[in-house]
């Protein structure tokens, strides 16, 4: 239910306007893991993504491939479009995933394992659960704070009702939409630039190289991973960076709550 440009350039602003000209931030591609679980003195520093190509605001372009229903990196489109917003028929406009991915990589966002997240929590970092509030109530990481990125559809217009009916009939689920007030809600319950660990159900990835046989064969390119794999925790990181957070004060949990629970870490809720 969304219309969007077939190609685009990235903007670091949520309103998708052309950013002021400044020296670009480049991230060198790596074909092997750049994990740094702990640094000097045992400090947890997380893992940077494994990239097939450098990421640079001035040179990254993308286009949507409707035949395969995926985004492709296509630097021929770099600088040709300022618009990076998708406009759904139900809900508010949102920044498309390739632009979010480029911003997060360029800012240096890093991930941590569930065990590292728990260790950071013991050092005063806050785990922020960005799943729906109802999902949080059922089960969440012990001590986590709920700050949902999505909400149930609130509109009553024609397309809002179509979306609600489609989700109810086809999936027996309530329709959801991005919360347009996420940034202001975050600033109302958190201290600006507070140290946060973002957690959703699955985690997603910023990696654009796929390491199927670690230590046996080099990582490979995968068209499905031209911009990693989106998730709510990564989208929430984008919103918080635009709200004033430094990427140095943000981590996201690899594998999300699924991995947290699989590894036997403490959970709370009505169905822990």
Image: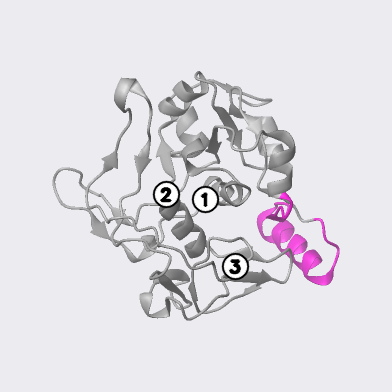
| Rendered location of residue 84, percent (x, y) | 56, 70
Give percent across and percent down for residue 33.
26, 44
Name the residue carrying label 2. 205
Q: Is residue 162 located in the magenta-colored stretch of the structure?
A: yes
Q: Would you say the residues marked 3 and 2 are in contact, meaning their CB atoms lie under 8 Å apart?
A: no
Secondary structure at badge 1 equals loop
Mark 1 vs mark 3, CA separation in Å = 20 Å
Crowding at mark 1 (Cα within 10 Å: few <14, some 14-19, many 20+): some
Image disc number at residue 231: 1
- For the point 77% across and 62% down, the residue is 165
* CA distance separating discs 1 and 2: 8 Å
Residue 147 found in image quarter: top right
Is disc 1 in contact with disc 2, using a CB cutoff of under 8 Å? yes
Query: Dot 3, crowdedness within 10 Å: few (<14), some or many (≥20)?
Result: some
Q: Earlier in the sequence, mark 1 or mark 2?
A: 2
Residue bounds of the magenta highlight:
154-181
């Amino acid at each position: 239910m969304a219309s969007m440009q077939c190609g685009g350039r990235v903007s670091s602003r949520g309103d998708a306007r052309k950013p002021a000209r400044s020296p670009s931030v480049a991230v060198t591609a790596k074909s092997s893991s750049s994990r740094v679980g702990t640094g000097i003195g045992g400090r947890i520093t997380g893992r940077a993504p494994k990239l097939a190509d450098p990421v640079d605001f001035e040179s990254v372009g993308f286009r949507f491939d409707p035949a395969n229903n995926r985004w492709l990196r296509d630097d021929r489109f770099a600088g040709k479009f300022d618009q990076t917003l998708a406009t759904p028929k139900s809900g508010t406009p949102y920044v498309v995933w390739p632009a979010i991915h480029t911003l997060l990589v360029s800012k240096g966002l890093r991930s941590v394992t569930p065990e590292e997240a728990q260790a950071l929590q013991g050092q005063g970092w806050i785990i922020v659960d960005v799943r729906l509030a109802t999902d949080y109530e059922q089960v969440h990481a012990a001590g986590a704070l709920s700050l949902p990125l999505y909400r149930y559809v609130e509109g009553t217009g024609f397309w809002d009702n179509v979306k609600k009916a489609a989700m109810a009939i086809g999936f027996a689920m309530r329709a959801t939409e991005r919360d347009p007030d996420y940034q202001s809600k975050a600033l109302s319950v958190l201290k600006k630039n507070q140290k946060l660990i973002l957690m959703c159900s699955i985690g997603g990835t910023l990696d654009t190289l796929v390491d199927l046989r670690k230590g046996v064969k080099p990582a490979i390119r995968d068209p499905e991973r031209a911009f990693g794999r989106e998730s709510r925790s990564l989208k929430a990181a984008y919103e918080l960076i635009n709200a004033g957070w430094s990427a140095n004060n943000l981590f996201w949990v690899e594998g999300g709550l699924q991995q947290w629970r699989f590894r036997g870490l403490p959970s709370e809720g009505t169905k822990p």
